[in-house]
Image: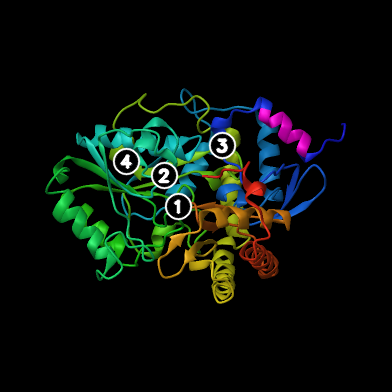
Amino acid sequence: MAKVTVDQLYEMDAGLIADAMKLRFFPHVIEEGEGARLRDVEGKEYLDFTASWALASIGYSHPHLKQAVMEQLERTTYGGLVSSVHRPALELAEKLIELVPGDFYKKVWFGLCGSDANETVGRLLTLATGKRRMVSFIGGYHGSTAATMAMSAHVAWNQFIGGGNVVKVPYPHPYRCPFGDDVGDCAEKAIRFLEDYIFKTICPPDDVSGIILEAVQSDGGDIVPPPNFLPLLEEVCRRYDIYLVMDEVKVGMGRTGKWFAFQHSGVTPDVVTLGKPLGGGLPLSAVVARREILDVGTTLAMFTAAGNALSCAAGLATIEAIKQDGMVENARKVGAYLHDKLAALKDKHPLIGDVRGLGLLQGVELVRDRGTKEPASVETAKVVYRAFELGLLVYYVGMFSNVLEITPPLIITEADVDEGVAILDHALADVEAGKVSDEAVAAYTGW
């Protein structure tokens, strides 16, 4: 195979691949990956603090996953669920039902990505309850299909008009409370706004089928809500007979130091949606929910390739690898170490306004002024670009594009953390010193 350069491949990409599917922060080409490292076509190695948007949660080229996929390929290249049954799907469904809390009859639906999982939930909830509305939260990112863009309330979808059946309400953000910084308990204010204003005006609760949210908003800015928020919200759902839907597509499967992020609050959702890391890199999503929701009818949410045998075998192997390698505990332990290291950077860099997160989901919010909290959006893009030049992959998220999101593979070590945080330290210093030009990041618009 002839040698090519990163520049040559990016030139091909510009002419061949649709811009509509691109979210680029720097000129990165993936050629090989192992563990928490990626290499490009020129042989340069990068420490990965993204896990490819949390998808590669068990790291790249995990031997257990590779073996499971190869064994399944030897049996068949395809096996579906629409008009047949296969063992990997049944075995994976059993595992998921065991993992997801809830002392009630649960079943599993399989899809290809988080978007189709959340869209399916919206569709089936309406049919199962006869209620026409849903509630979601500002900053939530639930997918990129038309229906899930309507569920979402993220700046990325500002150019689209969502469906009128989803009402968006403020998410309690401790650093930027939407009700003001001096209003008392932000979680209580959010619940009161929902129950005493929204429900009494434009969205009667007896017409709400479900409330969907992330236990930690990821693309919205890695926002960890106050600890009383989810229990209060669960009480509202039970009081009005509304299903509680937790979107764990990005934050689940061990990332926060528990299998699911909502477990930090002790709530028991009626529906849990999964995606990204579930397939270990292969396309796979799932809905684990009360039977009466998923059994509302047949032929209502079918995709020919959904729940295919290869992806389900990968899903089983991913769960096994997480358990066997102690990745949930590693996420808790190394995540705490990572948080402390990032928090220490705040004393050195005036750009850092806030550091927050759970486990190996951490957000570093950059601001131009700590008093006004003016978002440092351009500076954030420059930090990410400079870190890339120095050998670290990190992306940014948030409603103002000013939060460094750190979601490394769950196998990350404290030594990896030391290396990555040192690079971030270097990158922040270079940006603060004006060493990264506007022109350097002009071609990479990010969010």
Task: Identify the mark at residue 155; answer none if there is no mark.
Answer: 2
In the image, what residue occupies the spot 57% across and 33% down? Answer: 309
* Mark 2 to mark 1 CA distance (whole Å): 8 Å
Q: Report which quarter residue 154 is drawn in.
A: top left
Q: Is residue 147 magenta?
A: no
Where is mark 3, residue-wise? 283
Earlier-in-chain disc, 4 versus 3: 3
The image quadrant where one finds the N terminus is: top right
Residue kind at label 4, given as amino acid type? Arg
In-image side of 28 versus 353 (left or right): right
SS of the residue at dot 3?
loop
Q: Residues within 10 Å of mark 4 (few under 14, many from 20)?
A: some
* Mark 4 to mark 3 CA distance (whole Å): 24 Å
- What is the x, y in percent for residue 37? 72, 54
The region drawn magenta spans 7-14
Tell me if I can see residue 295 in this picture: no
Task: Identify the mark at residue 379; answer none if there is no mark.
Answer: none
Task: Identify the mark at residue 291; answer none if there is no mark.
Answer: 4
Where is mark 1, residue-wise? 400
In the image, what residue occupies the spot 14% across and 44% down? Answer: 204
In the image, what residue occupies the spot 73% across and 32% down? Answer: 11
Q: Nearer the viewer, mark 2 or mark 4?
A: 2
Along the line of sight, the residue nearer the viewer: 9 or 87: 9
Earlier-in-chain disc, 1 versus 3: 3
Earlier-in-chain disc, 2 versus 1: 2
Q: Are marks 3 and 2 in contact (CB under 8 Å)?
A: no
Q: Residues within 10 Å of mark 1 (few under 14, many from 20)?
A: some
- What is the x, y in percent for residue 129? 21, 37
- What is the x, y in percent for residue 383? 62, 58
